[in-house]
Each structure stands twice: as C-alpha cells, then as structure tokens.
Amino acid sequence: MISPTVRGEILVCQFPQAPALECSTNGLTVARSPMACLDAAVTRKYAGILIYFAARKIKARDTLVELCSDLNEIPITCSTRKCVSLLCRNRNLLVKLKESGVEYVDIRLPTGSADPWSMWERLNALESSLRIDFHLSRLCPFLRYKPISDQNEMITCAAYRNRMVLGGRRLRDVCQSEAYLQCEFYLNPRTNT
C-alpha cells in the first residue's frame, strides 16, 4: 500500500468506453470525457493525470492528442505527471502523443482492467517501460497505417514499398519488437527508384 503522501489526488480521464476501475476510488477524480477532464484539470492541482483511452474509431485519436496537448499547455497542468493508457501500439499515434508532450504511455491488454493506483506506483517508480521512447524504439519506423474503415487500418511495410501487408506473427514478433533491427527489409529498404 502506498502512503497517502505519495498517492496524492489523481485525475483519471476515461473515454469513451474505458474499462471499469479495479481499485479504491478514494483520492481519485474520474472524468468520462475530454471536456470533463479539462474542466476537472483546471479546477484544482492534481498529483497526476492518468488517461485511459479505449476508442475504436480512428478519428477519436485526434481528440486524445488534442487533450494531451491542451493539458501540456495549461499552466496548472503543464508540470503535472501524465500517463496515457492505450489498447495497442500504433506508431503514428505514439509519435503524435510525443509531439503533444506526452512522456509516459502504458499499453494494456484489451481485456485488462484499469487500476490507476498500480499505474501511479509504476509512474512514480519511473518504470522505463512506461516511457514513450521505450515504445517507439520497439516499433519499426517503416510501419505505415492506411485507414480502411472508421475503426480499422491496413498496416504495410514502407521498406517494401508498402506492398507487404503486415499482421499476425510478423507484425507482433518482428515489426512491433526490437527484432525489426534484424529484419531484412529494415536493413535493406527497397526504394522507389
């Protein structure tokens, strides 16, 4: 159990249909929309802000990036430690989050529950697996995402002129891990010449 002095008050933003909280809500302020999160964030100073993002729609990612950017620009929240919890690694989204000022990201299982106090402990321990750069370093820079519906994307390999669709084992075990550093396409990308 964390001491109350380490815990502090935490703002938890969940949208749109985030998992149920699996912990005591004492010391938590829960906001269930980006606007509610911003409203709560400017009304008082929090020890931390945790954002649980579970949207399936691709366009909802822009709302997340905008929220994070706003939280990093508002004087009362710009120095507050923030962490975004996502359902999957997406290089484009992680790059945009980093550009908006996000430093910490947690990738959770789609069936996983939300435990803000556990994440807060990991964040206070400065766990390296929460750093956004850790996640970006494990994703091949040649990953390309093309929307094929409002919720799905086709992932291709730009090192193979976007002619190779990625998925399953190759995507998981090579392109989304440090193994991409030994990938034949990463080492010898085919150019459009």
Image: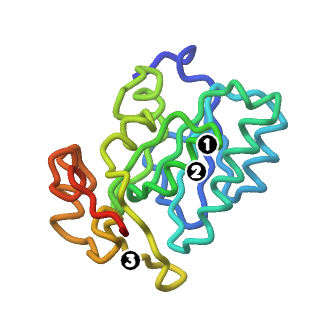
* Residue type, numbered disc 3: Met
Q: Which residue is mark 2?
A: 96
Distance from Cα at disc 2 to Cα at disc 1: 5 Å
Instruction: Say above or below: 43 vs 18.
Output: above
- Mark earlier in primary sequence (1, 3): 1
- Badge 2 or badge 3: first in the primary sequence: 2
Looking at this view, is 61 or 40 the one in front? Answer: 61
Question: Which residue, given by chain and number where applicable, does mark 1 sit on?
Answer: 99
Label 3, on which residue?
Answer: 154
Q: Quadrant of the N terminus?
A: top left
Q: Amino acid at mark 1?
A: Glu
Q: Residues within 10 Å of mark 3 (few under 14, many from 20)?
A: few
Assess whether mark 1 and mark 2 are in contact (beta carbons under 8 angstroms). Answer: yes
Residue at position x 71%, y 56% from top? 34
Q: CA distance from mark 1 to mark 3?
A: 24 Å
Amino acid identity at mark 2: Lys
Q: Nearer the viewer, residue 2 or 169?
A: 169
Residue at 36% across, 36% down: 134
Badge 1 crowding class, 10 Å Cα cut-off, few under 14, some 14 to 19, many 20 or more, is: few
Q: Position of residue 45 (x, y in %)?
A: 76, 27
Callout 2 environment at 10 Å: few (<14), some (14 to 19), or many (20+)?
some
Q: Dot 3: what SS?
A: strand
- Identify the residue shown where x is 53% and y is 38%: 83
Local SS, label 1:
helix
